[in-house]
């Protein structure tokens, strides 16, 4: 009887071990070829389109894309939760330091597109252009009424992004020169939501990526009061004459830049991937920036 019980226990142990091995193998198989991407809401429509088109021609590839903001994506990368972080701003010094402390190396950066960070107003707003100084005064609350910049006698309602947004960081650094947004600014969870709010609010003004123009109107931006206004177009962004142009980035661990991930990033920066950049409404990289 004891021998029979020992045989049963051994058989049960073997079966449990085999089941565990099979489950582990299934988990590895499920993850094979899977790429996880998270970050910039500015980039999410572009990243989703890249993934969709790439998976169509690469049947074994599985790419999961989510937004949340540039800061959220970079934090997830540092925590080892994702493969690629999308960011509409450069990584901060403290983010790099934290990454180096954990992994012993800097995250690898690739430029993947160009954007003209656009300033949006309601379609019924008569304002067609503003200079950088006026934008700073509007978004910090110094200018409170549209009549102060040639518009109707109406209160200005500022719409902004959450502070985890790369667009928020970029606009604050380059237009507000580090000053805080006006306390009354309406914080929106994404660029699409921001534009929907401005579409319904004649008094509204906000900012966002060039690909999100539906529902509102991008105004011309002047570097100063004496220079002509410039619209965010491919030509003005590529040649740098539009005052609020920027690169869009991806970040990843250098050790992960191989096999499926490397192939995907190379495709993103190829002619096929950059064609999608233009289709979505952003601007392709100049050829010289497509090299590794």
Image (cartoon, rainbow, N blue to C red):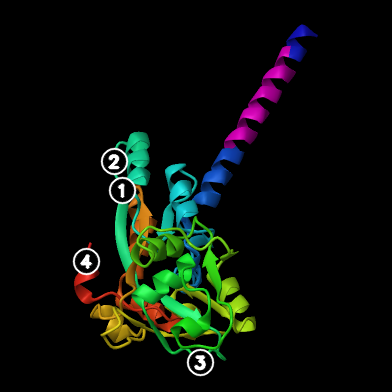
Q: Is mark 1 on a helix, strand or loop?
A: helix
Q: Which residue is drawn at 55% across and 60% down?
A: 183
Q: Was residue 14 drawn as part of the magenta stretch in this picture?
A: yes
Evaluate if marks 4 and 3 touch, with contact meaning CB atoms under 8 Å apart. no
Residue 88 versus residue 268: which sits nearer the camera? Answer: 88
Residue 46, x across and y down, in percent: 46, 72
Report whether residue 99 is seen. yes
Label 3 environment density (alpha carbons within 10 Å; few <14, some 14–19, many ≥20): few
Considering only order in the chain, which callout, 3 or 2, is on the residue closer to the N terminus? 2
Q: Depth-wise, is mark 2 or mark 4 nearer the camera?
A: 2
Label 4 environment density (alpha carbons within 10 Å; few <14, some 14–19, many ≥20): few
Q: Name the residue under label 4.
A: 291
Q: Depth-wise, is mark 4 or mark 3 nearer the camera?
A: 3
User: Over which residues does the magenta segment extend?
Assistant: 6-21
**Horizontal placement of 12 versus 181: left or right?**
right
Between marks 4 and 3, how big is the CA–CA gap?
44 Å
Considering only order in the chain, which callout, 4 or 2, is on the residue closer to the N terminus? 2
Considering only order in the chain, which callout, 1 or 3, is on the residue closer to the N terminus? 3
Instruction: Work out whether 43 lies above or below 100.
Output: below
Instruction: Work out whether 191 lies above or below 227.
Output: above
Q: Residue at x 38, y 63 (%)?
A: 170
Q: Was residue 110 drawn as part of the magenta stretch in this picture?
A: no
């Amino acid at each position: 009887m004891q021998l029979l019980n020992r045989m049963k226990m051994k058989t049960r142990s073997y079966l449990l071990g085999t089941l565990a091995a099979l489950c582990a193998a299934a988990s590895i198989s499920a993850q094979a070829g899977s790429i996880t991407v998270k970050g910039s809401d500015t980039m999410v429509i572009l990243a989703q389109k890249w993934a969709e088109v790439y998976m169509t021609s690469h049947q074994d590839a599985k790419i999961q894309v989510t937004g949340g903001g540039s800061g959220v994506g970079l934090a997830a990368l540092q925590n080892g939760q994702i493969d690629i972080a999308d960011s509409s701003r450069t990584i901060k010094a403290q983010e790099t330091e934290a990454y180096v402390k954990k992994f012993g190396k800097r995250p690898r950066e690739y430029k993947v597109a160009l954007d003209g960070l656009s300033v949006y107003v309601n379609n019924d707003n008569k304002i067609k252009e503003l200079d950088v100084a006026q934008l700073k005064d509007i978004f910090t609350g110094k200018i409170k009424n549209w009549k102060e910049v040639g518009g109707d006698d109406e209160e200005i309602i500022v719409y902004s992004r959450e502070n985890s947004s790369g667009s928020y960081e970029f606009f604050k650094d380059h237009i507000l020169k580090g000053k805080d947004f006006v306390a009354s600014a309406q914080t929106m969870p994404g660029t699409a939501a921001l534009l929907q709010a401005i579409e319904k609010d004649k008094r509204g003004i906000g900012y966002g990526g060039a690909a999100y123009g539906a529902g509102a109107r991008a105004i011309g931006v002047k570097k100063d009061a004496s220079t002509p206004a410039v619209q965010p177009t491919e030509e003005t962004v590529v040649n740098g004459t539009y005052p609020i142009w920027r690169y869009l980035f991806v970040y990843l661990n250098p050790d992960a830049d191989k096999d499926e991930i490397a192939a995907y990033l190379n495709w993103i920066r190829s002619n096929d991937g950059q064609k999608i950049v233009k289709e979505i409404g952003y601007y392709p990289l100049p050829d010289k920036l497509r090299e590794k």
